[in-house]
Structures are given as structure tokens and as C-alpha cells.
Amino acid sequence: MELGSKPGRALRPDAQAFDEVRITTVPRYKRSGLSGDEWRISAKIELLRKGRVIVEEYAGTVQAATAMLPGLFLKAIDDGRAWFAGEGDFCDQEGCSEPATVTYRLRKSYCMEGHPSDPLSPLFRRFCQRHAKRGDCGLEDADANYESVEAAVTHQ
């Protein structure tokens, strides 16, 4: 691939497949002329990203839901429902579902050992105003490694 090819979104800093997991009880009233009426409880598992439910599954109890969670999590990733790069107009800060208002181009990419390289194609990250200041502790996700882009660039 040559330099200057199609720009894209860089992986989110500290990228995870989902940024929120919920297990909640779901009460329902069962009516039966034969066995009688009663309240029943089940559990709902939700895997969320950027405030949106990506995966939803039900279990009989909260205990069963906690046992199902690791397999459900891995299946969601295998089914392509995980997304690690920035998406749409959302802030790239993990766990933030605010609209992105600031766009940065990465100057360098860094491998796991901390070695810098020039990106093969332009890579961008987008943040809301609250998360636009990145700090100076990291290598790739640091203010010094970003160049501000005035025109909003959206790549999904």
C-alpha cells in the first residue's frame, strides 16, 4: 500500500469491543387459568457501545446470565458485532457517546513495543470537546502525536 491512499479512522485508544455491559432483571406477570397467576423474573444481558445496544440476550436468572456472559461476549466478536475503530460521528474516547467535534490526524503509529512508524494511509481520530485534550503520557494517543484537522472528516 502506498502513502496517500484512502484515509481511515484509527483504532480507538484503549479499544474494546463494547464499552458497557448490563445485566438487569425483567419482571413479567404470568397468567394461567390452570396453574395460577404469578410474577416471574428473567434476566436481560445487553452489550453496548457508545450508548447503543449492540447485543441483547435473555437468561432465566441473573446467575445464569453471568455464566452466559463470556460466551455471549466472544460470540458477538466472532459474529462481527464488535468494532474497535472510531465510528460515525461519536467521540473516540472509550465510553463516551457524545458527538465528535474535533478531528485529529495521527502523525505516527506505534507498535506494541513503542516503535513509531509513518501510517501507510492517513489515519484520523475524532473527539468531543471534553476529550479533545489527550495529554502527554501515551505515545500514540498524546497531544504531540496529533495534528488538528479543521474540516470535519468522517470515516466509518
Image (tube, helix red, strand yellow):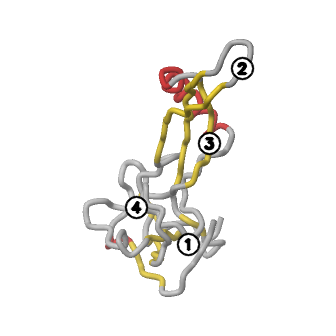
The disc, 3 or 1, on the residue closer to the chain's N-terminal end is 3
**Which element type, helix, strand or loop, lies under badge 3?**
strand
Kind of residue indicated by mark 1: Pro
The disc, 3 or 4, on the residue closer to the chain's N-terminal end is 3
Q: Which residue is mark 1?
A: 122
Q: Which residue is mark 4?
A: 116
Q: Position of residue 48 (x, y in %)?
A: 53, 48
Q: Position of residue 90 (x, y in %)?
A: 52, 66
Q: Is residue 93 above or below residue 153?
A: above
Query: Which class describes the residues within 10 Å of circle 2: few (<14), some (14-19), or many (20+)?
Result: few
User: Which residue sits at x=49%, y=36%?
Assistant: 24
The disc, 4 or 1, on the residue closer to the chain's N-terminal end is 4
User: Which residue sits at x=53%, y=86%?
Assistant: 151
Q: Nearer the viewer, residue 119 or 149?
A: 149
Q: CA distance from mark 3 to mark 2?
A: 31 Å
Query: Which class describes the residues within 10 Å of circle 1: few (<14), some (14-19), or many (20+)?
Result: some
Kind of residue indicated by mark 4: Pro
The disc, 4 or 2, on the residue closer to the chain's N-terminal end is 2
Q: Which residue is mark 2?
A: 32
Q: Is residue 62 above or below residue 46?
A: above
User: Which residue sits at x=40%, y=48%?
Assistant: 112
Q: Is residue 43 above or below residue 88?
A: above
